[in-house]
Image (tube, rainbow, N blue to C red):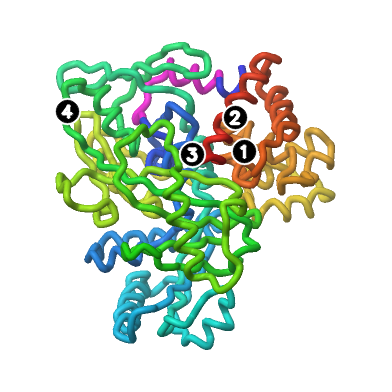
Amino acid sequence: MNKREQQCHRAATEVFDIAIIGGGITGAGIALTAANNGWKTIIIDKNDFASGTSSRSAKMVHGGLRYLEQFQIGLVKEALHEREHLLKIYPHLVKPQPFFMPIYKSKFSKLKLGIGLTLYDKLSGKKSKSPKHKSLNTSTIQQRFPQLKTDKMVGGFIYFDAKTNDARLTNEVIQNAEDLGAVALNYADCLHFEKNNNLTHSIICKDNLSNKQFSIQAKLFIIATGIWTDDTLKKYNADDVKKYMAPSKGIHLVVSANHLPKDCVMILPTSNGDGRFLWCMPWEDNLNIIGTTDTDYKGNIEEIQVEQNEINYILDSVNAQLRNSKLTENDILSVFAGIRPLLNDDDEDKKSNKRSRDYKIWWNNENTLTISGGKFTSFLSMAEHCLDTVKEKLDYSSNQIQENIDILIAEKWQPLLNKYEGKYGDNNAKRIISIVQDFNDITLSNQDEKYPYSDVEFIFFIRFQNALKIDDLLTRRTLVTYQMKNFDAEYVSKIATIMAKELDWNDTQKLNEINDYKNAWQLMHSWH
């Protein structure tokens, strides 16, 4: 019985303390916190883990400087403290990042932002290891950012937040929960809630890979489906017509990092006078992400299209601030669109960029609750708040400390272990080397000529982080899809061969998986 079959068997036959519906960062944080508290936990998602908003964010772990202007001080303080926590516990995935904010209007604008940044530094806490902000004059800006026009600037600031690989962080958090005994099932769709009086006793699910139905029994159910909250609550109560969510859309362009600074995020004003800012984020694998838009969204949340006018909006805004070398559509390696899970505050006149990024938790019945909204950065504090709400309904266990993985690494593999530790952390680096040792094949760890990944990394993601489809592997466990400007049939076939061997695909399934991935790739490489 392979891992997937074992997880499906456990899901259908055991009774859990907590069943979490939704495998984005919010559900992942709840699963880890619950498992760490000793509760028997299962987490499911109808698609891949992190396939929604949690792989389509701006890749920032931040307090949200602009929310200070909206007086959401509590939200910012919580996020800043969580930023510090994540820098400490996931140093291979959450890394310090300087941001440059230019000032164009007046010296008063600079004074106002300086006061805001001083408050931002203070809210980070006395134990924060992030450097304090610093002021730059225009001559320093010209030297530091020669790409930028400075004729209308009155100065600027460097301040510090952090960046991450959102999809990898989500999947590692879920893996950490599994290490503590949790069951994690992607491609498992919640179809219906089985209720008796004011209690939910099970949920009817479908395995979207095998099309088999099964039920999950638990003492308590948590709905954490983000932008799908309204859809999930319809399954809970078909008569509920309330709209709980008012999502907004944000698109991003991915370009080579060679076009922009590689060591600092540039925050640039938009060119159409709407008062918003874009940022150019240096990312992994020599990529830079430019975004984002922020518009109300009422379309199809299953397949989110990028529009030509959104592309123009970003390119025009960035090019308006660049001195010489302009970006064109030909420089775009890929695009992606995400939907922010904003709560509906019943104010139809309020624009999406003015709506709160806070979250809410509410009971649907005696043992079913919903959590929605919130910021990516605050996922662990959201999880703690959510589980504080349910403690009285479950027997509480003491913390389960996750120990280091006990894998014996031969001395000859030590240099390779050191290489992977910086990217995957100590425990997962050991797992990767154990795969190489099992195969006794050093070539497994050789980086591909086209993309900065080795076969052993792909095998690791399949065996330990629930990668079941090519899109899981190339878009959410690695960044290959973002880099693959033209569809690389030869490389995709190679990946399909690795997956077929690991997951026992036949030739027909292998071909179907390649076609499915090509459709997913096209969505990230086209606009309308």
Q: Secondary structure at mark 1?
A: helix
Q: Which residue bears the numbered disc 1?
A: 474
- Compute the Cα span from label 3 to label 4: 32 Å
**272 vs 5: above or below:** below
198 over 398 or under it: above or below: above
Inter-mark Cα distance, 1 to 4: 38 Å
Closer to the chain start, of discs 3 and 4, is 3
For residue 34, what is the image quadrant?
top left
Judge whether 1 appears above or below 173 on screen.
Answer: above
Range shown magenta: 5-20
> Label 1, label 2: how many angstroms apart (C-alpha)?
9 Å
SS under mark 2: helix
Residue at (26% x, 36% y) in the render: 370
Q: Which residue is mark 4?
A: 241
Disc number at residue 174?
A: 3
**Distance from Cα at disc 3 to Cα at disc 2:** 23 Å
Residue 202 appears in the figure: yes
Residue depth check, mark 1 versus mark 2: number of the one nearer the observer:
2
| Residue situated in front as seen by the camera: 414 or 271 | 271
Which picture quadrant has residue 271?
bottom left
Q: Secondary structure at mark 3?
A: helix
Residue hosting label 2: 517
Residue 402 appears in view:
no
For the N terminus, the image quarter is top right
Nearer to us in this view, 283 or 298: 298
Mark 3 surroundings: few (<14), some (14-19) or many (≥20) residues within 10 A: many
Residue at 45 percent across and 42 percent down: it is 306
- Packing grade of label 4 (10 A; few <14, some 14-19, many >=20) is few
Q: Are marks 3 and 2 in contact (CB under 8 Å)?
A: no
Q: Are marks 3 and 1 in contact (CB under 8 Å)?
A: no
Mark 1 surroundings within 10 Å by alpha-carbon count, few (fewer than 14), some (14 through 19), many (20 or more): many
